[in-house]
Amino acid sequence: MKEAVGVPHRHLANAIQYILDEKNNEEKTEHGLYVGGNAGYDSGEILKTFLDTKELFEKKNGRQGYHFVISFAPGEVKADEAYQITREFCEKYLGDSYDHVFAVHTDKKHMHAHIIFNSVNRIDGYKYRYNKGDWKKYIQPITDQLCIQHGISPLKFEEDKKIGVSYASWNEKKNKKIGWTRIIQADVDWAVNHSDTLPEFIDQMHRFGYQVKAGKSKKKNITYLTYIYTDDDGRQHRRRSYNMPQGYSPEDIAKRIKQKSGSRMYEEIADLLEKKHTSIPVEIVKNTGTYRRMYQAVSYYRLPNPYAVRSGVRKDILNIDRLIDEVKYIRDNALTSKNAIEEREARLESQIEVLTRKKWNIKDSQESLSNEQIRLLDRKRELENELSQNPDDDKFEKLQDELEEVMTLIPEEIASDEDAVMVSDRIKDLRRELRMVKRIKENETSKENLKEKDKERNAKWKITN
């Protein structure tokens, strides 16, 4: 909401009164039953809270506030649940940093919630801002999580209501990654702890699929071991012991075998993998091929017979986050049968086909633009680029104002380049989802064959031992 002429906060005051429906005795909100927030209980008190924050940080002018509208599919939720979801959204997205009020309107066939929050952060005084693409980065993860928790369709945001950016901390996810060095360390650790002599250690490493070669570095004047693992794609992964943490040189290996002491990287990896997948309800997905692959990767270093698992287990360890995502996808979409997987696959292919046609129609429309319309679209891109450069608050609002004015001059029937980008992004997302479904399908198709191979491996292992 922009600053109004004469009284800067006039638009903000009108918006608050509108969502509370005070002029109609609050009929849309069941007489105030479905109103919440952290700024007060009526429009006067709420507005005063907003203005007090602005005055505290001397930021009375410029953008006054922001207005979100969350829409639910008709008949999908009742007013109580819509209220709960909206409250949870505000808690996760705004927290205590912004004065806000929300109201669920029950006057339409579809439940919808209005959220209005202050443009000034009441903790640090910084002004809220939105950059292109921030919705997908910051808001959608929150709404997707809420949808899963409440078992409803994805929440829908009305783009014309000025969606904004959350805190950068939402995007700062620090997930520990597992690479080949850690896997090689873990394999060596496992072999050391299951060997009584150096020849037994070498034999264990061979069983894992390794070559272990000794060498001497003249430059470093040390002897070393090179651990070489060839994966299923034929790529070799080499690590020399002097480039690894202490404990992997020939002398250290001999000492550790004798003392049965030293690093236990395999326990660390097993613990890390188990922590990553503990949130998945096993009873729902345990019979799927994808879960089987994930389980073997997670349990690999603790299995009684790790040699009996499928050959690609190390690759699955590297891609454990992807496998976990796939298992959660199976759970969330009830893809526990081959028919359900194939139906999902067909639906995604159909959606991609429809959006691809829309994309080409947008391109055809853009090719027919007049020179003036092309100039406006070029200026729109320039403004969006300048906004993405993180200008100060005053410049940001001037640029945003000009962008809104430019957008009003572009006819609605002419698709903008933003529409084309959004369609392209959606196609990319659907294609990624389709690839996931195809991998799930492949796992289910090969599940029975893998079981037979496992039986053969177990039988062979028993014979050789």
Image: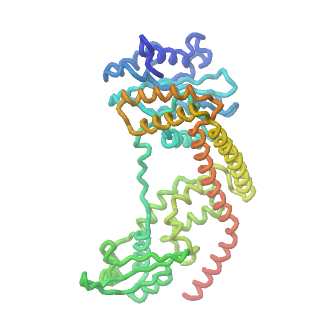
Nearer to the camera, 291 or 409: 409
Q: Residue 435: horizontal and vertical position, in percent?
A: 63, 58
Task: Tell me: residue 84, above or below residue 320.
Answer: above
Q: Residue 312: horizontal and vertical position, in percent?
A: 56, 72
Residue at screen point 49% across, 65% down:
318
| Direction from residue 59 to residue 142 in the image, left or right | right
Can residue 245 be seen?
yes
Image quarter (top left, top right, bottom left or bottom right) of the C terminus: bottom right
Task: Tell me: residue 431, above or below residue 235.
Answer: above
Task: Tell me: residue 434, above or below residue 55.
Answer: below
Residue at screen point 57% across, 39% down:
417
| Image quarter of residue 393 | top left
Can residue 152 be seen?
no
Residue at screen point 44% across, 70% down:
180
| Image quarter of residue 261 | bottom left
Q: Residue 194: horizontal and vertical position, in percent?
A: 43, 80
